[in-house]
Amino acid sequence: MRAAFFVLAFVLAIALFWRAEAARAQDFQLPIDCRVGEVCLVQNYADSNPATGAAADPQCGPLAYDGHDGLDLRAPAALARAGVNVLAPAAGIVLSVRDGEADGAYLREGSTALNGRDCGNGVRIDHGGGWQSQLCHMRAGSMRVRQGERVSAGQALGLVGLSGFTQFPHVHLRLERNGALVDPLTGSPMANLRCSAQGAAPGAHWSPAARAALAYRGTRLLSAGFTGAAPNSDASVEDLPANAARTAQALVFWTLASGPRNRDLIRVRLYGPDGALLVENTRTQPRDQAQASLFAGRRTPDGGWPAGSYRGVAEVLREGRVLATRTQTLQLR
C-alpha cells in the first residue's frame, strides 16, 4: 500500500511538472532582441482575408500578403547589419536547425535560388503543451544552438538576416498547437481569421510585456537617414550609403514608411544649419501599401555645403493630421 502511494505521488509530481512546463510554454516572449513598436515593428501579420488573391492584416490594412501564415518582426536594415539577436520565444527543445543558406539570395536571383527553402536559415522548437515554433530568415553562420539542445525563454538563437524568401531583414515566427497551424498574434486557428476595424488583440499565450508591444499600430515610420548619393526611383532607401559629406555629390534625406494607407500624405523636409528649408518632397499614397519610401535632396553647390547641423523631418499625415513623425540630424564638418 505504501509503495503504491509513493508511485502515485511520483506520477502526480511528473504530471504537475509537465503541466507547469506547458503553462510556461504559453507565456511567449517576443523572438527578437529589439523594442517592437519603437525601433522594430510588425511588418506583416498572418493573412486575415480567406479569399485567394487578397490579403488583409487584423484591421483590414496592408500589413499582410496573400497566404502569409506568421508574424514578421522587422528590424531597420542598419541595425540588422550591426546584429540583432533572434530569441527563443519560450523554453523548449530544439527539433531542427538549418544554416548555410545565403543571405539575399532571393533579392539577387529570385525564388529559383531558394530550392523550396523559403524559411532560409531557421530553428524549430518544441515548447511542450502541444506548442511548436519555427523562426526563419536568420543570418547565415549565426546559429548558436543545435538539434536536441534545451533552450530557455529569451535565449539567443542567432541573428536576424536575409536568408530565404524575404526582401528585408526580419524574423518570421510560425506557431503550431497540437499539430495545427495557428495565428501567432491571437493563437486562433488560421482558418478562423477575419479582419475588422477593431482589429484583434494579442492572445493569452503571450506574456504581458509582449502583448503590450504587439498592440496594433498600423502606419509607422520605420527608418530615415542621410546619403550623399543621388538615388534613382528604384533604389532601396535602406541600402543607400551613409556617405553624406560637405563635398559629396548631393545631400539627400530619406525615409521608409510601413503600412501607409490610400490617400495618406508622406512628407520629407531638409533644413540647413540656419534653420531654413532647403528642400521638401511629398507623396500622396495612390493605394494601401505594405511600405513606401520617399526622399528629398539637392545637388551640392560649388564650394560644398556649409558646415553645421542639418535636420531632416519625415511625416505621415492622414486627413491633415500628423500620424507619424521622425527627425534625424546630421553634422557636417
Image (cartoon, rainbow, N blue to C red):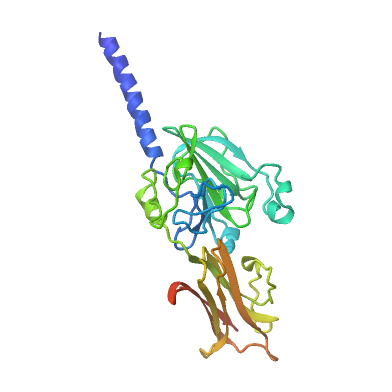
Residue 330 horizontal/vertical position (percent): 56, 79
Which residue is drawn at the image coordinates 63% and 87% (left, top)? 305
Q: Position of residue 308 (x, y in %)?
A: 56, 86
Residue 57 appears at what percent x and percent y? 48, 54
- Tell me the residue at 59%/38% (across/down): 97
Of residues 12 and 169, the one drawn nearer to the viewer in this rendering: 169
Task: List x then y, in percent, for residue 192.
Answer: 45, 42
In this rendering, position of residue 188 left or right of residue 72: left
Q: Quadrant of residue 205?
A: top left
Image quadrant occupied by the N terminus: top left
**Of the pair 107 and 55, the residue shown nearer to us:** 55
Question: Which corner quadrant holds the C terminus?
Answer: bottom right
| 92 shown above or below 267 | above
Relative to 59, is 44 on the left or the right? right
Residue 276 in the image: above or below residue 266: below
Q: Is residue 222 above or below residue 132?
A: below
Q: Residue furthest left?
A: 1
The quadrant in which residue 188 appears is top left
59, 162: nearer the viewer: 59
